[in-house]
Image (cartoon, helix red, strand yellow):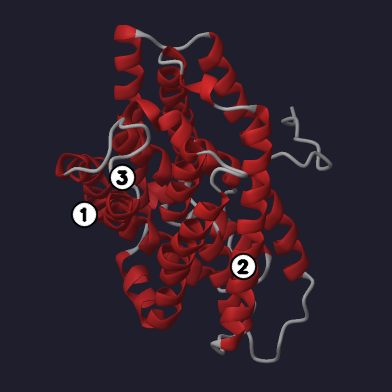
Amino acid sequence: MKRPQWPRWMPVDPYIVLLLATMGVAALLPARGAAAEGVSWLATAAVAFLFFLYGARLSTREALDGLRHWRLHLTILGCTFVLFPLLGLAGQALVPVLLDDTLYRGLLFLTLVPSTIQSSIAFTSIARGNVPVAICAGSFSSLAGIVVTPLLAALLLGGGIGGGGGFSTDAVLRIVLQLLVPFLAGQLLRRWIGELVLRHRRLLSLVDRGAILLVVYSAFSEGMVRGVWGQVSVVRLLELIGVEAVLLAVVLAVTWYGSKALRFDRGDRVAIQFAGSTKSLAAGLPMASVLFGAEASLAVLPLMLFHQMQLMVAAVVARRRERDPAPAGDPLRHAATDHR
């Protein structure tokens, strides 16, 4: 029996529907007490397992080969951890006209999060870009983000949102234990389990999505129990969406035309555009849970909205890039990847 397919004309990724449904369940049936502790522990374990699978999937040789493109990786890291935060800081001028202080802090946190892995690879592949470089770039960005994102949060966000959570040595240690240690464990065991993980790519996709749903449910449940959501109006949400649309448009333009000015070839420009303009839910959500505590549900709202927006816009851009004529001597690189 053929599995039912999501209608192609629907602009919303089916996974975003699951995210919205999870938020709805958290609003109606939030986890409380011992149940909340259990959900939080399960979400932490799922994220750790996800990064373990990331480590087992990435070939060490592939990573070392990717280091040869150091200029490209520095460009992508610059977009992710310099350009985005600078634009985020510029957004402070919108407070309180378009954004209140709480949503602005969430927007600023969004700009500090590392790049995606699956999405940037998938869109780079569709657009006939340099897929091996996109794989390494996404992985390097995620690893760098484990350290860089908390440090930038300490520098730019201080004590966090509304005093809940915040930066501390303990917060960094928890992020390292949850993300970096499992990744390194996966690298160490890759010799024995790497081929198995590559053969079962769907498992990585399911763990990826399942971990995010658990973190969303845990964060939004805590926000409901503490009454955080009463602080945000519909008008403010619409204004936030408009601000994020401008943010995404600016970064997409800078990554594409800036990489041309830096004399990268077309394949590398495609990788730079998609790896340099996307933000990772998988990395951002657990970090927000650690850094912002009870206020994490509001802290991740801008990230969740931006994630949906980047998927929709990047899909359109990738299809347009796919129709570009291939320059002479510029090899076409394709890879079968799972969409996030």
Q: Is residue 340 visible?
A: no
24 up-or-down from 132: above or below: above
Q: Earlier in the sequence, mark 2 or mark 1?
A: 1
Judging by the rendered image, the residue that carries numbered circle 3 is 52
Occupied quadrant, residue 121: bottom right
Q: Could you tell me the amino acid type at mark 3?
A: Phe
Q: Earlier in the sequence, mark 2 or mark 3?
A: 3
Judging by the rendered image, the residue that carries numbered circle 1 is 188
Name the element at disc 1.
Answer: helix
The residue drawn where x is 52% and y is 43% is 303
Residue 337, x across and y down, in percent: 57, 54
Q: Is residue 235 left or right of residue 110?
A: right
Residue 318, x across and y down, in percent: 70, 63
Within 10 Å of disc 2 (Cα), the crowding (few <14, some 14-19, many 20+) is: some
Q: Could you tell me the amino acid type at mark 2?
A: His
Q: Earlier in the sequence, mark 1 or mark 3?
A: 3
Q: Could you tell me the amino acid type at mark 1?
A: Leu
Residue 280, x across and y down, in percent: 47, 49
Q: Is residue 145 left or right of residue 314?
A: left
